[in-house]
Amino acid sequence: MEIRKVGVIGSGIMGAGIAAHLANAGIPSLLLDLAQDAPGQPRDILARTGIERALKARPAAFYTPRAAKLVTTGTIEDDLDKLAGVDWIVEVVVERLDVKRDLFKRLVSVAGPETIVSSNTSGLPAADMVAGLPEDFRRRFLVTHFFNPVRYMKLLELVPGPGTDPSVVEQMARFGRSVLGKGVVVGKDTPNFIGNRIGVYGFMTAMRRMVDEGYTVDEVDTILGPALGRPKSAVFRTADLAGLDTLLHVSRNLYENAPDDECRAVFAVPDFLQSMVDRGWLGEKTGQGFYKRVKSDGESRILTLDLATMEYKSQERLHFTTLDAVKDIGDQGERLRRIVEGDDRVARFAWEMLSDVLTYAANRVNPAHPIADRIDAVDNAMRWGFNWDLGPFQTWDALGVPWVVDRLRAEQREVPGIVVRVLAESGSFYGQSQSGRQTVYVSSTGTREELAKPDGTLSVAEAKQRGPAAILASNRGATLVDLGDGIACLEFHTKLNTIDVDIINMLTNAVADAAGRYRALVVGNDAPDFSVGANVAILLMASRMRQWKDIDRQVKALQDAHQQLKYSPIPVVMAANGRTLGGGCEIMLHGSRVRAHAELYCGLVEVGLGLIPAGGGCKEMLLRHGAATAKTGPFAAARAAFEIIAIAKVSTSAEEARDMRFLRRDDPVSLDRERLLADARADALALAEAGYIPPERPTLRLPGEGGRLVLEQQVDGFLATGAISDHDAIVAGKLAYVLTGGPASPIVPVSEQDVLDLEREAFLSLCGMPKTQARMSALLQTGKPLRN
């Protein structure tokens, strides 16, 4: 049975978020909540309000507002019977066992004979929710625990009850992965399952150590952030985002329902957290928690809660020598060891937290009472649900199991049983089989198993493992890799995949050398971002040294490389994901096809640096908006491209990128990042087998001086109101000149090369301006754009 329609009961943040993400995937849903009889309001006002909140949410819950049309609202009282026609019903009501049990009793007579029913509970036992209900209902019941915000958090925990049919779990796992793009883990029916069991332990022990040892909120979040492979939000900002009431509920649930947990006392709610919840300081949703944003004199400032006084004070911008010393170390294990081997305040706290979490996680896979059958499920839950770079068992291996064990024993701390067994068996939780595949230690059997590769996934790293023959060409900036079946992949590997001369050379050579070597080319990588654009540091240095000929030559080489991609005799498919900005967006625009990840944040953002797109971005946006057709006048395309480029508009999803015409109407989208490269490879192969023919070279009709004057009038209006700066106006004027064709006549077509030459001319002139150089310098120093 395929899941084609879903019923969602409960329209709070999670319920509406699940309905929104189902809509993102093209799955219609019926969203129900309690009926309201307020005068002048529809009875389904709660469900309607849930969707309205989702539409206004930031970050956005829907890929585009259009997707909300796939959600129908109703009430539990009036419309529950309509759920007989859905394939899956997910309950997302208040976290009270009695309320959930009453609802499931009603669903017994409503749900179809094959309808899957699930709860989104974050920790209530699956067995208790359906105890006493018919066996056939329990066969189709399980927990489907999404993490908030649903669209962005990859983790989906599946927890079967004692009577759940294994085929139901398998079906939901396939649906979660292939349709919703989730990372699925299967957990045991234990308190708070996998992610929250480990994650909330980490939060609570951090709070306790902070208070006991005299650390501040700012210190803890600085120490337990990116340097330790955790997100920038670290502990307390993450707690604010999740909601302190949620944290309190989960922690209390663990304290009450895990009496045999050796660390049960850690989950007792501290007085300051209870006080914060009592005061309504719940974090992001109420405007204050451990952090509070205030505005004064037109500027926004972040305040931090001082737990000693329960008053807010200015946030501390901390720099620790220990952390600064390791920021350029790429190897995660070496970086962690360098941090925790120290003897300063940072090292002590980092080691205490790491060792606490590592030992706690290891004790949670005790064969007697495991939270999961496999340690890789625990690692994936923490990576996908809490954005850790490495899960706890991957961290054991990165630090070195023998090294951690020696230190624990030196401190007279107990070493978990599974760690003792792994130390005796091989010394690591993960390994490699004789066939070269990754293996994992299985705690329940004490044996090793090969990690199963999810269907339809592919990575560049996996392709490289085939041996030296898989590397077709390489330099410092990029590598050409054989993906099999005559498909090559060009992988960028500079920092943030910034574009430099090495990448330009590889782009050029990959197309020039294609004949007889491969049938199609994919441009993609395993990194979080496709490319954030040009290497600004090199450009700034060349500009300050007034190396205009060198800059002109490199920009011309980039333009030529992009044109080679566009008119390549073989298909070139762009596997675009994450940030695809500036020059990265320009590369994407020149592909034969784009296979985009749903979370595609692309845009031509050069104006923020006081520049304009000069790698063909202006040209391509003109073409995408109709400059090569006679359907609209010559001004329409110039205006549409100007409105997008002049404000550095960035898409918030692949579907919005399509609306902005960064993507074509037929460019496909993958919701699962791990399937992106495999899908792009399949697209490339299909194009090659269909007998790919490169596009014809178009001419453009542009409005010339008349169109430019109209755009400049708009710029003057913004300048007069103070909406833009003088330098913004100069940059916008240069952009208007390029997009309207410079000296072009609206009745005389211009070539692509004419527009490319205008791009390059404007780009060079802006590079020489001190305020543009100041913007480039500010971005490199602060990571933020400068308005000057």
Image: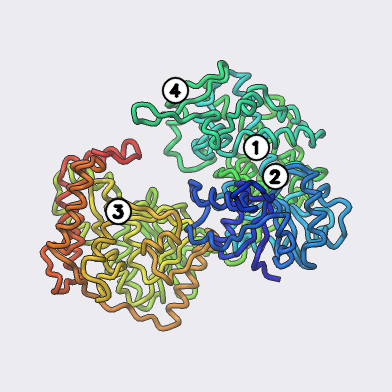
- The first of marks 2 and 3 along the sequence is 2
Dot 4: element: strand
Q: Quadrant of residue 230?
A: top right
Q: Residue at x 65, y 43 (%)?
A: 393
Label 4, on which residue?
A: 314
Label 1, on which residue?
A: 246
State the image coordinates of residue 452 (x, y, percent, origin top left): 65, 61
Observer-side mark, 1 or 3, equals 1
Numbered mark located on residue 266 in the image: none
With 132 as the anchor, is 554 left or right in this view?
left
With 379 as the anchor, is 734 left or right in this view?
left
Mark 2 is surrounded, within 10 Å at the Cα level, by few (under 14), some (14 to 19) or many (20 or more) other residues, namely many
Observer-side mark, 2 or 3, equals 2
Observer-side mark, 3 or 4, equals 4
Disc 1 + disc 2, Cβ < 8 Å: yes
Residues at marks 1 and 4, CA–CA distance in whole angstroms: 26 Å
Residue in front for this viewpoint, 654 or 717: 717
Residues at marks 2 and 4, CA–CA distance in whole angstroms: 34 Å
- The first of marks 1 and 3 along the sequence is 1
Numbered mark located on residue 122 in the image: 2
Residue 667 appears in the picture as rendered:
yes
Residues at marks 1 and 2, CA–CA distance in whole angstroms: 9 Å
The three-letter amino acid code for the residue at tag 1 is: Thr
The three-letter amino acid code for the residue at tag 3 is: Asp
Numbered mark located on residue 500 in the image: 3
State the image coordinates of residue 763 (x, y, percent, origin top left): 19, 53
Disc 1 + disc 3, Cβ < 8 Å: no
Dot 3: element: loop
Residues at marks 1 and 3, CA–CA distance in whole angstroms: 46 Å
Disc 2 + disc 4, Cβ < 8 Å: no
Dot 2: element: loop
Residue 155 appears in the picture as rendered:
no
